[in-house]
């Protein structure tokens, strides 16, 4: 006989699982009919689409993801809000149609390692009215992939892959940008343009001086270390996720505040990822 549980217990269990072990939601969906619908909704809220296993977030294989999206808006996957998408999902010709089916996206990480040398058609991003946090390969800046786009909802932009950005980021595409991140470094001209545009923080994960920098400003944070990229993305997408870690945006905001309060100095160079030390400065 299929067990039944009070809805309050089911919801509490799913909530805790989503915070502690999101990847376990799929197993919980099989417990009973009462968990199936609720778990499916939570399961599809944050997804990683890849050809190999990831950390934390529920994983779908590319073909499986395509088949579910083909069912249209009736399937919970179409309502995904936080998505890390591997380039193996599709050729560039199919790239737009996949994202167009996910109109509720708030966080999008295009983990296009194998396609980073190509210029994709990103016009579909302009249809994502709720998109707030966008991660794309740094190489796409030099290829002009963002040229002629306007993404007013995006406030956080991260340029992934350890490539030093020598081209100026087209800030016109992001009129409401507050945070800009680089997996490596960027030219002084690129950083200065972002600061003049009014961003609250610029995060660089590369070593200052190799080949650019350091650029000294209260809002420029050279971050040394950090957490695993999978955990970083999941924490960015789902701040309520329970591990006591900070994503790079939260960490950078804390560094900027500590500097404004006179507890840290921009001249001290790279800031080691240490949440405890920053909390002590608060």
Image: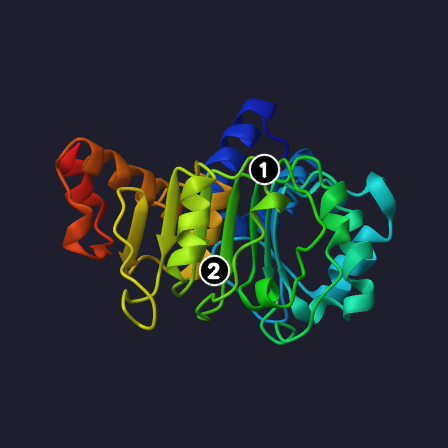
Residue that appears at 27% across and 39% down: 256
Residue marked by disc 1: 175
Residue situated furthest right in the rendering: 71
Q: Nearer the viewer, mark 1 or mark 2?
A: 1
Q: Quadrant of residue 132?
A: top right
Does dot 2 land on a helix, a strand or a loop? loop
Viewer can see residue 2: no
In this picture, is 179 found above or below 211? above
Residue 227 percent location from the top left of the image: 34, 57
Circles 1, 2 touching at the beta carbon (< 8 Å): no
Q: Nearer the viewer, residue 15 or 269?
A: 269
Relative height, residue 209 to residue 198 (above, below): below
**Residue 224 visible in the displayed image:** yes
Q: Dividing the image into 4 quarters, which one contains the N terminus?
A: top right
The image position of residue 246, as x and y in percent, is 34, 45
Left or right of 57, for residue 240? left
Instruction: Write down the residue under mark 2.
Output: 55
Q: Residue at the spot x=82%, y=67% of the render?
A: 93
How far, Cα to Cα, is label 1 from label 2? 33 Å
Q: Position of residue 92 (x, y in %)?
A: 77, 68
Q: Residues within 10 Å of mark 2 (few under 14, many from 20)?
A: some
How many numbered dots are placed on residues in this image?
2
Quadrant of residue 10 in the image? Answer: top right
Identify which residue, 267 or 19, lies in the foreground.
267
Q: Residue at x 77, y 50 (%)?
A: 124
- Label 1 CA crowd tier, 10 Å (few <14, some 14–19, many 20+): some
Above or below for 234 versus 177: below
The answer to whether 210 appears left or right of 14 in the picture is left
């Amino acid at each position: 006989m299929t067990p039944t549980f009070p809805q309050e217990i089911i919801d509490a269990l799913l909530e805790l699982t989503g915070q502690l072990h999101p990847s376990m939601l799929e197993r919980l969906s099989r417990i009973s009919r009462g968990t199936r619908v609720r778990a499916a909704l939570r399961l599809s809220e944050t997804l990683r689409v890849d050809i190999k296993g990831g950390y934390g977030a529920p994983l779908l294989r590319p073909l499986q993801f395509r088949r579910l999206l083909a069912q249209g808006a009736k399937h919970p996957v179409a309502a995904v809000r936080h998505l890390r998408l591997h380039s193996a999902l599709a050729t560039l010709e199919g790239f737009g149609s996949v994202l167009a089916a996910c109109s509720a996206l708030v966080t999008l990480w295009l983990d296009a390692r194998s396609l980073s040398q190509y210029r994709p058609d990103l016009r579909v991003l302009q249809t994502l009215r709720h998109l707030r946090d966008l991660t794309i390969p740094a190489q796409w800046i030099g290829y002009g992939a963002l040229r002629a786009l306007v993404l007013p909802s995006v406030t956080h932009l991260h340029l992934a892959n350890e490539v030093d950005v020598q081209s100026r980021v087209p800030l016109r595409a992001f009129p409401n940008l507050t945070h800009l991140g680089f997996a490596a470094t960027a030219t002084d001209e690129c950083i200065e343009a972002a600061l003049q545009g009014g961003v609250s923080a610029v995060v660089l994960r590369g070593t200052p001086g190799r080949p650019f920098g350091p650029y000294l400003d209260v809002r420029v944070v050279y971050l040394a270390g950090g957490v695993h990229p999978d955990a970083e993305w999941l924490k960015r997408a789902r701040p309520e996720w329970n591990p006591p870690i900070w994503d790079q945006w939260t960490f950078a905001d804390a560094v900027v505040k500590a500097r404004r309060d006179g507890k840290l100095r921009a001249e001290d160079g790279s800031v080691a990822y240490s949440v405890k030390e920053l909390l002590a400065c608060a």
